[in-house]
Image (cartoon, helix red, strand yellow):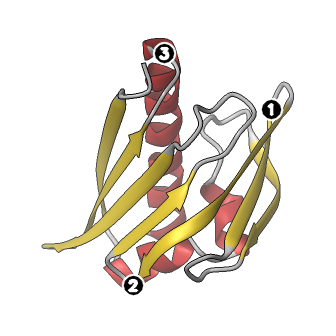
Amino acid sequence: MTDLTLTARRTIKAPPERVFNAWLDPAMMSKFMSPRPDMHVREARSDAKVGGRFYVMMVGDKDYPHEGTYKEVTRHSRLVFTWEAPWSAPGTYVTIDFNPVAGGTEVVLTHVKFLSEESRDNHMQGWTGILSKLDATVA
C-alpha cells in the first residue's frame, strides 16, 4: 500500500520567507514540530542544504524520532525531504510548497508512501497539528 498519499493545506498569516525559514531553524522547529498539545520537541537539528540532514525527537507518551535528508531546498518556495521513522515505509518523502497569498502564505504539504491507510490517516492528523502549531508560532 505504499502508493498512499496525503495532502494537508493551511493558510498562515505570515510571509513565505518567515514560514519557510521556520522549517529549517532548529529553535523554531522545536516550537511546532510536534502534532499534539501533549507533545513537545526534545531535540531538533537541521543542516539546511540539499543532501543535509534533519533530526527531530518528538516526545509524548514515548519518544518519536524522525529524521531525513533534504532533497530540494528552494528558498521561500519549496522543500522536499525524506521522512524516516521506525514505522515509516521505505522511500517516503514530504514536499512542502509555500505559496504567497493575500495576507500570508498557503502551505501545501504532500506526504507520499504509507504502509497502510491507518498510517496515512494518523500522519494526516499529525501534519494538521504541526501546521496549526506552525501557524501559532510564526503568525
Disc on res. 116: 3
Which circle's residue, 3 or 1, is located before the other in the chain?
1
Disc on res. 60: 1
Residue 113 appears in view: yes
Q: Are marks 3 and 1 in contact (CB under 8 Å)?
A: no
Counting from the top left corner in percent of width and height, residue 63 is at 85, 35
User: Mark 1 belongs to which amino acid?
Assistant: Gly
Is label 3 or label 2 in front? 3
Which residue corresponds to mark 2?
17
Q: Residue at x 70, y 69 (%)?
A: 53
Binning the other alpha carbons within 10 Å of mark 1 as few (below 14), some (14 to 19) or many (20 upward) gives some
Instruction: State the CA–CA distance, disc 3 to disc 1.
Output: 23 Å
Mark 3: which secondary structure?
loop
Instruction: State the CA–CA distance, disc 3 to disc 2.
Output: 34 Å
Q: Is residue 5 above or below residue 65?
A: above
Q: Residue at x 43, y 39 (%)?
A: 128
Instruction: State the CA–CA distance, disc 2 to disc 1.
Output: 30 Å
Q: Are marks 3 and 2 in contact (CB under 8 Å)?
A: no
Mark 2: which secondary structure?
helix
Counting from the top left corner in percent of width and height, residue 82 is at 56, 54
